[in-house]
């Protein structure tokens, strides 16, 4: 059982999960950009996509941010709390917090559009564009975290 937990919390598992999420972010962004010219027909789909991606980023950001706490809870620390693991924890904490905030602000922008009794029709395109930019920022943060975790492996080999 412990080997399964180690595998699921290993940096390569994080890198694979990040790659999947970056793909989803890019796919969502492509869909939004493709339909942005016909906002009246596709606005609800765009809102749903951005809201869903924001929720995913919030959830994954929390999991990344609390990796060290999770490792302690699962009983993998302090025995496996080595210098490389501390580095992974630090990067996951920093990037997880940033990803969490990006996802949260994406959800806020979508909610501003959907909020009843708040007339934002004139600002809907700007809010959707801003949420899309934040979506891309979330993808960049995920890719950066993956790059740092991959580079760490090569630094250990040197």
Image (cartoon, grey):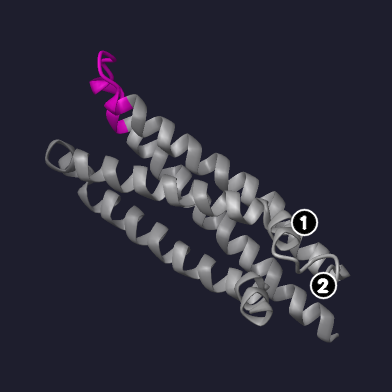
Q: Toward which corner of the image does residue 129 lie, by quadrant?
A: top left
Name the foreground residue: 25 vs 14: 14
Q: Nearer the viewer, residue 18 or 29?
A: 18
Q: Residues within 10 Å of mark 1 (few under 14, many from 20)?
A: some
Q: Is residue 95 above or below residue 102?
A: below
Q: Which residue is mark 1?
A: 90
8 relative position to 20: left or right: right
Mark 2 sits on what residue? 80
The residue segment tinted magenta is: 113-125
SS class, disc 1: helix
Residue 146 shown left or right of residue 46 in the figure: right
- Name which of mark 2 and mark 1 comes first in the sequence: 2
Give yes or no for contact between labels 2 and 1 (Cβ–Cβ under 8 Å).
Answer: no
Q: Residue at x 25, y 13 (%)?
A: 117
* Quadrant of image for the C terminus: bottom right
Quarter holding residue 125: top left
Where is residue 102 shown, x and y percent of the image?
Answer: 53, 42
């Amino acid at each position: 059982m412990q080997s399964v937990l180690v595998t699921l919390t290993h940096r390569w598992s994080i890198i694979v999960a990040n790659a999947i999420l970056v793909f989803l972010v890019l796919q969502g962004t492509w869909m939004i950009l493709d339909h942005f010219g016909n906002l009246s027909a596709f606005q609800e789909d765009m809102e749903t996509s951005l809201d869903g991606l924001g929720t995913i980023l919030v959830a994954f950001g929390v999991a990344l941010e609390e990796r060290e706490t999770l490792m302690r809870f699962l009983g993998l620390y302090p025995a496996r709390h080595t210098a490389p693991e501390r580095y992974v924890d630090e990067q996951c904490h920093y990037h997880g917090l940033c990803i969490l905030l990006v996802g949260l602000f994406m959800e806020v922008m979508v909610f501003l559009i959907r909020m009843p009794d708040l007339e934002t029709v004139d600002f809907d395109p700007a809010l959707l564009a801003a949420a899309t930019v934040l979506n891309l920022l979330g993808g960049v943060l995920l890719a950066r975290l993956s790059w740092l975790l991959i580079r760490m492996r090569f630094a250990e080999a040197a």
